[in-house]
Image: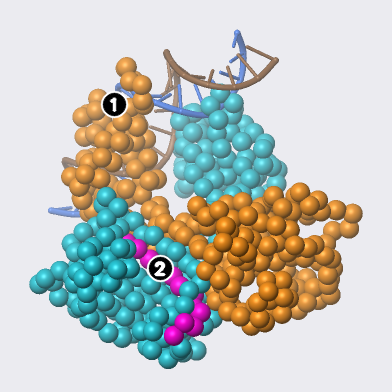
Chain colours: A orange, B cyan, C blue, D brown
Amino acid sequence: MKPSFIPAYYRLAEDLKNQIEAGELKPGDMIPSEAQLAKQYGVSRMTVRQGVALLTQGGFIETVQGKGSFITKPRMDKLLFKFAGGSYLGDSEKISSRLHNVEVVKAGAEIAGKLKLATGTKIIRIQLLLATEDGIAALDTRFLPYVKGQPLLEMEIEYADFPELVARHLELVPVKNHFAISLGCLTANEAAILGEKHGTPALCIEQIVYAANDNPIGWSKIVCPNDRLKITAVSQTF
Amino acid sequence: MKPSFIPAYYRLAEDLKNQIEAGELKPGDMIPSEAQLAKQYGVSRMTVRQGVALLTQGGFIETVQGKGSFITKPRMDKLLFKFAGGSYLGDSEKISSRLHNVEVVKAGAEIAGKLKLATGTKIIRIQLLLATEDGIAALDTRFLPYVKGQPLLEMEIEYADFPELVARHLELVPVKNHFAISLGCLTANEAAILGEKHGTPALCIEQIVYAANDNPIGWSKIVCPNDRLKITAVSQTF
DNA sequence: CAGTGGTCTAGACCACCCT
DNA sequence: GGGTGGTCTAGACCACTGG
């Protein structure tokens, strides 16, 4: 309120956070009550609550009505993966993508199922080659419904995120992105492009983009038969 | 304020959220100003702000000082993976783990490096076999520093999360968990246990648990030479 | 300049928890 | 009951944005 370059609630939150990180307050401990903090810092209770809310958001404390606010144990079971760029590949890695081909094809049973379309429906297949400094790392095959009179620009394909690309082509807003990572085998087509044998084991990263109402609007599968792709994540406390 | 089973700020947030989800408010649109909403709902501005804060937290809007609050595009590049149970395996899958062996061994160069210990330091190696209904799926090999006079109970090993186990053994608080997923090959030891050949390609899930000051206190490596393990995630909007 | 969000107050009443 | 957090008010002043 008075003279302070930073908000009072922020100072309060930082103070408590420092106490937690210094170990003065341990998991399970209760922080001072809002009334106490208000008195101690000479601010109103609403201001205290604003500071406490920050800590709650940051996952440092949990508040329980009628009891108090308590220091939490860091959670280790929620992991945040951040994907970047058109290729959705991990973190700090330097990965470049190159367009391999674009074709309009008829949906096979598998793809038709994933995109909830009838078998044989025209769809667009885009294939990108992903490379690190060590050479070609993986193949990204993407499918999206074919929309008549909606040309795809090469520029768009190479530089847009997949959800972004799908959204632009279909003029829809993507709302959900589902990922699955597993060990799989190269299909004949994939093997041919990558210069490997059909059936070679590979890291598979599957991605389905949904619009509203759980309507699938795009499918992507990255296959990597080598160790050049690495997906990393750090636990998050919420 | 008056009689309402649900808080006023919550009603306000729900109203706006519904308008967004119904498409009445599109990405980029500005929501009514706080003053307008206060008047419209007959509540004070602080109450409005509380509701707006909810939407901000939920990732539905972004507020810009001096301009207003605007509907955001859903983010697709942040993915939340949830791991469950001692085996850290994906989602809805039914996976059971069975203790294979526990030994005190001397750290080789690789493990010593990961845990920032001197080569040859005594460490505990725990190996768990993971199985689905279809059979054995993977091998989880865990390493943690050996602490004299701190026995490990089998119960603990089988049922605790790895970070939890490490924490209990070392009497430290784990604060960070780093994951890396890639394609690797079975070591001779892993292959022998799993009944596969040395060098067989496998899905590798590496996990390092850190305490304060980026001090590594545990390392785990899951190897899966088949397709029975699947890691899934859904995009999160923050 | 007017309009917006950002911070803050000094109270109030309520719902919940414990003893 | 007394203590806790949860909600809410009716103002105030500030900082930032835009025309």
Task: Indicate the position of residue B224 as horizontal and vertical percent values.
Answer: 46, 79
Residue C11 sits in quarter: top left
Task: Indicate the position of residue B82 as horizontal and vertical percent values.
Answer: 45, 64
Residue B41 lies, with reference to residue B152, above or below; the image says above
Per the picture, the main secondary structure of the magenta-coloured stretch is strand
Is residue A68 at all visible to an observer of this figure?
no
Task: Indicate the position of residue B135 as horizontal and vertical percent values.
Answer: 46, 89
| Mark 2 Cα-neighbour bin, 10 Å: few <14, some 14–19, many ≥20 | some
Amino acid at circle 1: Val
Residue A185, label in figure: none
Secondary structure of the residue carrying numbered label 1 = loop
- Horizontally, is A110 left or right of D8 in the view? right
| Residue found at x 10% / y 72% | B149
| Residue found at x 70% / y 61% | A128
Instruction: From the image, tell me which residue sits under label 1.
Output: A43
Instruction: From the image, tell me which residue sits under label 2.
Output: B206
